Structures are given as C-alpha cells and as structure tokens.
C-alpha cells in the first residue's frame, strides 16, 4: 500500500508526505516461549528403601526432551517425564526438578521435596 499527500498553496509545496508499507500488517503471532508445564512434580514422603517417583507433564512444539536435577545438578540418565529412585537417608530434604525443552526453548518445573521417614526400632536384648 502506498499513500501520498501534498498540500500546495500557489506554486509552493508546504507539506509532502509519502508512506509506503509492504508486508507490515499480519495477524499471525510469533511464540518464542518454551514448553508449558501443566503438572509440576509433587513433594513426596517415603521410608528408606521405598521407591520415590516424580512426574512432570508438559506440552510444546515438536519433540519434548527432559532432564531431571537434584538441586541444580543434572542426574545422569534421568531423561524421561518421570524419575524414580530408591529413597535413602541422604536424600532427606533434597529437591528435584525437571527441565523440559522443545524447539522454542526450555522451561524448568518447580522443585519437589523428598522427605525421608525415619522409623524407630525397638531392640530387645535377651537377659
């Protein structure tokens, strides 16, 4: 589209404006954000030796990839929408989160806490 305007008084041009627009108007939107996480992992409480399973649900563009982290450290081989481990005493209070990546970027879930139950055992000694 081309728009031109000129205002003349006698032989003198006071204002001249020319505007040219090509391909400037569009109703498509560009989405540059990464995947959307619809379900973050939940806090868990487990006894030592029980299986703790964290899950993340996400959607996005193309194939999604996953990387689970304990704190801020990647967990080797933990690259699925779920991550399971056998609860151990050194996991008490640890946080787990998942970074989900698609063709447009990445999004990290909120962290979920793993709490370990410590059970008391009574030992009876024979006299």
Image (cartoon, helix red, strand yellow):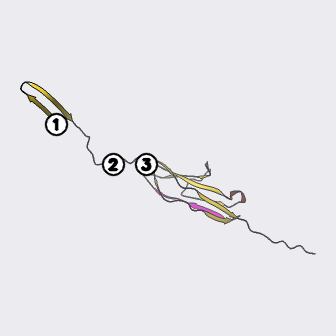
In whole angstroms, how far apart are the C-alphas of marks 1 and 2? 26 Å
Task: Name the residue located 62 percent from the left edge and 56 percent from the top edge.
Answer: 95
- Mark 1: secondary structure: strand
Q: Name the residue under label 3.
A: 33
Badges 3 and 2: C-beta atoms under 8 Å apart?
no
Neighbour class for label 1 at 10 Å: few (<14), some, many (≥20)?
few
Q: Mark 2 points at which residue?
A: 29
Q: Nearer the viewer, residue 4 or 101?
A: 4
Task: Name the residue located 54 percent from the left edge and 56 percent from the top edge.
Answer: 110
- Mark 2: secondary structure: loop
Name the image quarter holding residue 83.
bottom right
Residue 46 got which mark? none
| Residues rendered magenta in the picture | 50-62
Q: Mark 1 points at which residue?
A: 3
- Mark 3: secondary structure: loop
What secondary structure is the stretch in magenta mostly built from?
Answer: strand
């Amino acid at each position: 589209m081309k728009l031109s305007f000129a205002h003349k008084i006698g032989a003198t041009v006071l204002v001249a404006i020319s505007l040219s627009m090509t391909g400037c108007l569009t109703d498509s939107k560009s989405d540059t954000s990464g995947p959307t996480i619809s379900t973050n992992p939940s806090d868990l409480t487990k006894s030592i030796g029980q299986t703790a399973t964290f899950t993340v649900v996400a959607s996005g563009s193309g194939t999604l990839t996953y990387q689970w982290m304990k704190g801020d450290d990647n967990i080797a081989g933990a690259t699925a929408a779920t991550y399971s481990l056998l609860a151990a005493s050194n996991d008490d209070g640890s946080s787990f989160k998942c970074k989900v990546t698609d063709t447009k970027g990445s999004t990290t879930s909120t962290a979920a806490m793993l709490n370990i139950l410590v059970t008391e055992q009574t030992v009876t000694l024979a006299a």
